[in-house]
Image (tube, rainbow, N blue to C red):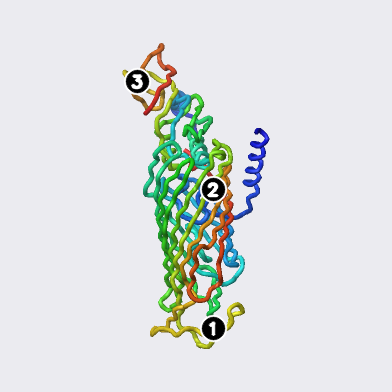
């Protein structure tokens, strides 16, 4: 087996390219989601355990009386709101309005959550400096 | 006030933790039909102990949330002691006789109408095969048979009240044309009211307690026996000697001491905490008309313990 400078250079280049590509991170920070249909402790436990298994979820607190899931996320997560809603549906419940805090940028009346590919129509767009900005908004 | 609250908490926790291995429907009523299903990827192991007319039954049930509105279950109740007792179906999700049953539950209607409130309707389809021969006072035991089962349940669920109504029918078949024995077909209907008293309306993750009042009505058809060698009297230690009724033109004998109709009612209790559920219930016969001579049945008892594997599939 002979050493080839050309092969070595090609290998280094490929490795460099791979290291330079960072995975796209979503920056959801906190989500308070109202859920309809949650009636019992076991239901709440099932939903909580199911949501905790989503990537990027740090903690989930459930209030049965208010029907609220309070989700805290780790920085640099790959979380998607659509995955959360799917999980709720798979547990037999209905996800409703949510209060979301996330990092992202404004695009007209829309707020695009960083790295998630998800954007939401917001009623109070306000830009505070260059993106990304931390913003709390309602989803209905 | 504070000490009362502590005493309540202690009693509730002690009740939950003292759960003897036994069963019911996991997170619904003990005897009647309900609509609740597991989430996708969740599973449960339920064990139950049932007592009726001097016969003790034990039933393990394994369930799995297959799809958003589909759940599959396998149960295999068996008699702990052999004794003659009315044969039929007495609980919604478990055969009343020793059988292996596969059950598919399809929640075809599902509407969440508010915080902690929803309306649901579920269909059940099952197939089973009997595993134990049951002794009879009027002759030898009937052959083991396969059976099919279909049921429907609908109800309203809320934080304070639960209401479920349901009905199902089990039809017994034959493994081969040569086997002419026929176990009783049976129909079960139920009406369940559930209540969570305000002082037990605690938020997650506290123990969750609910009370139910369950009324079930069962209709059980006649069993029949294929031709047997010898037509002399059959002697049994309980009922003495009986002469078999005359067979029909095909040689099949309809057994007069089989089947009947009955209505049972009574309270049940469910406690869930963490991933466990403990349930117990008793039903008293308010109307019991069994055909011919059959062992009396005044009450039914179910005690159950379930463990749930929650969290679904990892994403």
**Given the image, what chain letter belongs to the residue carrying mark 2?**
B
Q: Where is residue B144 in the image (x, y as percent from the top left)?
A: 49, 72
Q: For the N terminus of chain B, which image quadrant?
A: top right
**Furthest residue to the top?**
A129
Residue A12 can be seen in this image:
no
Spatial separation of the CA atoms under disc 3 and disc 1 = 84 Å
Q: Is mark 2 on a helix, strand or loop?
A: strand
User: Which residue is label 3 attached to?
Assistant: A123
Above/below status of B87 relative to A63? below
Q: Position of residue B100 (x, y in %)?
A: 50, 63
Q: Is mark 3 on a helix, strand or loop?
A: loop
Say which of B270 and B284 sits in front.
B284
Spatial separation of the CA atoms under disc 2 and disc 3 = 45 Å
Q: Nearer the viewer, mark 1 or mark 2?
A: 2
Query: Going 53% across and 66% down the picture, which residue do you hit?
Result: B98
Q: Position of residue B84 (x, y in %)?
A: 56, 72
Q: Is mark 1 on a helix, strand or loop?
A: strand
Q: Which of marks 2 and 3 is in front?
A: 2
Say which of B101 and B253 sits in front.
B253
Within 10 angstroms of label 3, few (less than 14), some, or many (20 or more) residues?
A: few
Q: Which of marks 3 and 1 is in front?
A: 1
User: Which residue is label 1 attached to?
Assistant: B242
User: Which residue is label 2 attached to?
Assistant: B211
Q: Report whether mark 2 lies on the same chain as mark 3.
A: no
Q: Quadrant of residue A90?
A: top left
């Amino acid at each position: 087996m002979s050493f080839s400078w050309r092969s070595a250079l090609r290998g280094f280049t490929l490795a460099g390219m791979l290291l330079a590509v960072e995975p796209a991170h979503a920056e959801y920070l906190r989500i308070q989601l109202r859920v309809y249909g949650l009636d019992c402790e076991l239901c709440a436990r099932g939903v909580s355990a199911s949501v905790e298994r989503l990537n990027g979820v740090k903690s989930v607190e459930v209030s049965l009386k208010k029907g609220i899931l309070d989700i805290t996320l780790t920085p640099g997560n790959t979380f998607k709101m659509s995955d959360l809603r799917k999980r709720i549906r798979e547990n037999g419940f209905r996800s409703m309005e949510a209060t979301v805090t996330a990092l992202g940028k404004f695009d007209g009346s829309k707020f695009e959550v960083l790295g998630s590919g998800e954007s939401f129509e917001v009623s109070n767009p306000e830009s505070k400096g260059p993106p990304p900005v931390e913003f709390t908004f309602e989803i209905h | 006030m504070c000490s009362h609250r502590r005493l309540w908490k202690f009693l509730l926790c002690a009740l939950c933790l003292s759960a003897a291995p036994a069963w019911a429907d996991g997170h619904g009523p003990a005897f009647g039909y309900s609509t609740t299903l597991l989430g996708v990827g969740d599973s449960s192991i339920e064990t139950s102990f049932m007592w009726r007319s001097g016969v003790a039954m034990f039933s393990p049930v394994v369930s799995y949330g297959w799809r958003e509105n589909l759940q599959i279950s396998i149960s295999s109740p068996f008699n702990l002691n052999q004794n003659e007792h009315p044969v039929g179906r007495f609980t919604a999700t478990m055969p009343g006789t020793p059988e292996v049953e596969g059950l598919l539950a399809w929640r075809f209607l599902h509407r969440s109408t508010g915080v902690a409130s929803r309306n649901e309707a579920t269909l059940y389809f099952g197939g089973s095969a009997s595993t134990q021969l049951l002794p009879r006072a009027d002759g030898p035991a009937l052959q083991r048979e396969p059976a099919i089962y279909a049921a429907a349940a609908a109800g309203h669920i809320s934080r304070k009240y639960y209401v479920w109504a349901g009905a199902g029918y089990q039809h017994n078949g034959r493994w081969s044309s040569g086997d002419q024995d026929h176990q009783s077909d049976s129909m079960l209907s139920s009406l369940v009211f559930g209540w969570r008293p305000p002082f037990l309306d605690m938020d997650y993750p506290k123990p969750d307690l609910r009370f139910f009042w369950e009324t079930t009505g069962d209709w059980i058809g006649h069993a029949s026996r294929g031709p047997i060698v010898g037509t002399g009297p059959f002697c049994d230690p309980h009922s003495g000697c009986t002469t078999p009724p005359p067979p029909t033109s095909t040689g099949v004998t309809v057994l007069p001491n089989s089947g009947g109709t009955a209505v049972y009612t009574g309270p049940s209790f469910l406690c869930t905490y963490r991933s466990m559920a403990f349930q117990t219930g008793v039903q008293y016969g308010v109307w019991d008309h069994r055909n011919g001579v059959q062992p009396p049945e005044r009450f039914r008892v179910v005690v159950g313990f379930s463990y749930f594997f929650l969290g679904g599939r990892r994403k």
